[in-house]
Image: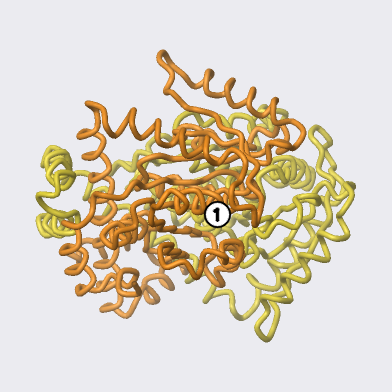
Chain colours: A orange, B yellow
Amino acid sequence: MRDVDDRRPAALAMLKQLYAHTGKAYIIGITGNPGAGKSTVVDAMISHYRAAGHRVGVVAVDPTSPFSGGAILGDRIRMQRHALDPDVFIRSLATRGHLGGMSRSTFDVVAILDAMGYDRILVETVGVGQDEIDVMRAAHSTIVVTVPGLGDDIQAIKAGLLEIADVLVVNKADREGADRTERDLLHMLDLRAHGERKAVEIVRTIATRGIADGSGIAQLAAAVAAHAERTWQGPDAPARAARRAASHIAELVRALLADQVEVALAKRGGLQEFAASVAKHETDPWSVAEALLAGLH
Amino acid sequence: MRDVDDRRPAALAMLKQLYAHTGKAYIIGITGNPGAGKSTVVDAMISHYRAAGHRVGVVAVDPTSPFSGGAILGDRIRMQRHALDPDVFIRSLATRGHLGGMSRSTFDVVAILDAMGYDRILVETVGVGQDEIDVMRAAHSTIVVTVPGLGDDIQAIKAGLLEIADVLVVNKADREGADRTERDLLHMLDLRAHGERKAVEIVRTIATRGIADGSGIAQLAAAVAAHAERTWQGPDAPARAARRAASHIAELVRALLADQVEVALAKRGGLQEFAASVAKHETDPWSVAEALLAGLH
């Protein structure tokens, strides 16, 4: 799938063709605090869906690992035992450089896995930045994983994460403090509810490395299925599908524009000359940006 | 400074004018693990620089707080005691929506604070995503803050963070495990060094809320000053300044392009019609994106 990442015209043509074969997969996003055990939850979910006869695609997204992809490597080691299963396809997405977007790559890779017949696709983020939240636009249901014992730090669970959660998981629920964590989550959900509160189920799991049937994973899958039924089989489904498509289109427009900027800058031999002149205060960055942009059209 | 965020033509004209008055401030980025106590470190640094007679600007960046800015609010409460000091200017940057970029806003706000005569500018990120790493391009020196006891989790300190660190801080260094954390950091720095290792000083701090002269803060300021002298007063300085200017210009070009996309989409009544058609599989997202882009020019 190297071509997809490279975004060459050939890949674009291929993506257009395969789109007719998509729409069968259910896409589940998994995000949450670093150290919350997201990849062990993913690992257990793979086993769960495989046991139920599904073919499972996994996309692991880590935009903060620009050089080595070290974190992703670690995660993948944990999923190693699925590596020989031809009905499990694991794909890592590291950063695509400064002008790239993780969200567009995720949408594209998910479309390919969908067309390939993987009917449960798990999109896991390693970090929890805005990029990762954007990535979740590609998901039908979003699971946010947290753990007891992260403390009462204001930043322990980010407001933005809570907003996108369809299902909340308290993982490592055998640890002390699980009750309190669940209570805090409920409280935060109530605080954010202006009027009617979005139905967000809270599930406790004890996903452990190497244990195929992690405790609570069946309940988690059931919570996801319940969310799927509520939202993607109800009267609101076409509008939701359109919003999801709009996110994908908007990402692609930005991506194609970014490509044009790169090409235009390369033609001018890059920014070096302008940048040196700005650094010497001979001109200012805003005037240079406007002039460059005018030259694009 | 509302105009800067709105990116109206009037603000652009103002920014161009004030650029001649910039270039005097030293800009220090502070990022690191959530819960590592970044804002208490920032708080202590404000006191340190104020005591040395500097005027201090603070930019707090949180792109993951799209709705309430809750996390930023919490951080600002901790810095409250500086609120009445006219020589301390604290400014929060929450997300600018999907088409915005935190990095461009940071560059712009830093330029304004610089022109206003704040000669030490602290840019603090709340999260640790790719956005926050990009934000650090605006800094002359980048401090990455971590704490003991985050565990040996593979994700405890992200590879991407380590790459951008000029000074590493082990905060809450009175906690058990500080020695091990420092050893681990040294080990990771060695691992990443292909050939010559970048000089990264590790400083231990015990920054505590409300304690003006946090232990280790003077050493931290000295480490920053040493980095400043090594890099911004050496023969490589002009090339570095040009790279920093290039980052700012590139951000602005992307920002102005994004604005054009928004305007063009609004003229067409948004993406609704296209999105519905893609959701029904009547067309595909890649073809729609290409057609929209062709219409822009």
Residue A55 at x, y percent in the picture: 38, 57
Q: Nearer the viewer, residue B282 or B140?
A: B282
Q: Relative to residue B232, is residue B135 drawn left or right?
A: left
Residue A185 at x, y percent in the picture: 59, 27
State whether residue A47 appears in this view: yes
Up/down of B210 relative to A262, above or below? above
Q: Residue at x 58, y 58 (%)?
A: B139
Q: Nearer the viewer, residue A225 or B134?
A: A225
Residue B133 at x, y percent in the picture: 54, 57
Q: Which residue is mark 1?
A: A43
Mark 1 surroundings within 10 Å by alpha-carbon count, few (fewer than 14), some (14 through 19), many (20 or more): many
Residue A57 at x, y percent in the picture: 40, 58
Q: Residue at x 63, y 32 (%)?
A: B76
State whether residue A281 appears in this view: no
Task: Indicate the quadrant containing the C terminus of chain A: top left, top right, bottom left or bottom right.
Answer: bottom left
Q: Nearer the viewer, residue A51 or B81?
A: A51
Name the amino acid, label 1.
Asp
